Amino acid sequence: MSEASAESLKRTPLYGLHLARGAKMVPFAGYEMPVQYPSGVKNEHIHTRSKAGLFDVSHMGQLKLSGEGADYFLESLVPVDIAGLAIGRQRYALFTNEAGGILDDLMVTRYDDCLYLVVNAACKAQDIQHIQARLPEGVKLEVLDNLALIAIQGPMAADVMTRVVPEVAEMVFMDSRPLSIDGTPCFISRSGYTGEDGFEISIPENEAERITRLLLDHPDVEFIGLGARDSLRLESGLCLYGHDIDVNTTPIEASLMWAISKNRRHDGERAGGFPGAEKILQQIETRQVATKRIGLIGSSRAPVREGAELVDDLGQPIGRVTSGTFGPTVAAPVAMALINADYATLGTEVYALVRGKKLPMAVSKMPFIEQRYYRG
């Protein structure tokens, strides 16, 4: 990294703590972020699956929508039931464009007085512009750039969190509450991006390092970098925006039909009314798409990386890998791909071209591991 480019990168409130813990820092979405720590990506992955991993996700965008009609306004931008979202609950959503493509995926939480949004770091500026350009009178958008965001994930996460915030024991997956940690007011949701039980915690930036150290003091908690975050989410079948989904992919092509709320579909009480509704709802009705996001498991040990071409048994191109790695929990290469829909049936054998070799892979259900979200 050149000195000039290093100077232009932003740093999260936990930057100094990452360096103190021996992190290898890399540019990511305009920030200097930890890709791994001394124990290495594989060990960090395994630690999260067996104990509790702590992730700095402060690069994500945190936004607040408030005012009368904020929920119906947001519904005009996403194919999701926002008006029916209960106070203290969180929901996955998608910003779509007029062609039905995905502009970004995000999380939406309803609190007493507002909607709280978490958007992807790389899309943060465009999402803010997208919302601001359409804001109706009486609805206000605030960019919460004075907050940090961390996530604690894994089977020991709940035990660690209940020691410092006993109230989280009452929460289930996708619950969200304003709660204090050691006297610091935070927003805590029981959610995450690994397939494990866990929590995401929004913290005032001036308290972020203190609260993070408090959690890291627990013997079962270790810092986890971007490398393991990627392999954990991939094993859990979770999309990464700009890789597995983008403006050229509709939610149906992306196998995200479950994210289109029933009351926003044909014959729903608030059907349509979002960008690209005509195309997206037609694809739901006909179940006809040319390409589809699918999961792949390799039969060799060699990982298949993003960008690898997929071919059929005659060597004809049929798709490409959008994310790929060796899955430490699965103990096999795992990948997501956009593929010709004719080849999307479970069990279909396809081939990935890697350094001139055809590596066999089978279309697999996702997630590749059993998700362990706590549903009560």
Image: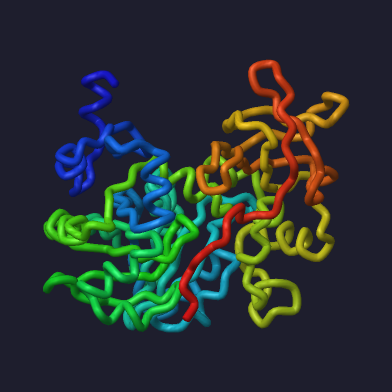
Q: Is residue 372 above or below residue 205?
A: below
Left or right of residue 151: residue 182? left
Q: Is residue 151 above or below residue 165?
A: above
Q: Residue at x 26, y 60 (%)?
A: 144
Q: How many marks?
A: 0
Left or right of residue 27: residue 335? right
Q: Quadrant of residue 321?
A: top right
Q: Residue at x 49, y 59 (%)?
A: 195
Q: Closer to the camera, 151 or 300?
A: 300
Residue 64 drawn at (x, y percent): 33, 66
Q: Is residue 8 above or below residue 63?
A: above
Asked whether residue 4 is in view, the answer is yes
Q: Is residue 61 above or below residue 298?
A: below
Q: Residue at x 66, y 51 (%)?
A: 254
Q: Closer to the camera, 301 or 375?
A: 301
Q: Quadrant of residue 184?
A: bottom left
Residue 150 drawn at (x, y percent): 29, 57
Left or right of residue 102: residue 157? left
Left or right of residue 151: residue 371? right
Q: Residue at x 63, y 50 (%)?
A: 101
Quadrant occupied by the N terminus: top left
Residue situated furthest right in the rendering: 314
Residue 143 drawn at (x, y percent): 29, 58
Residue 45 drawn at (x, y percent): 42, 46
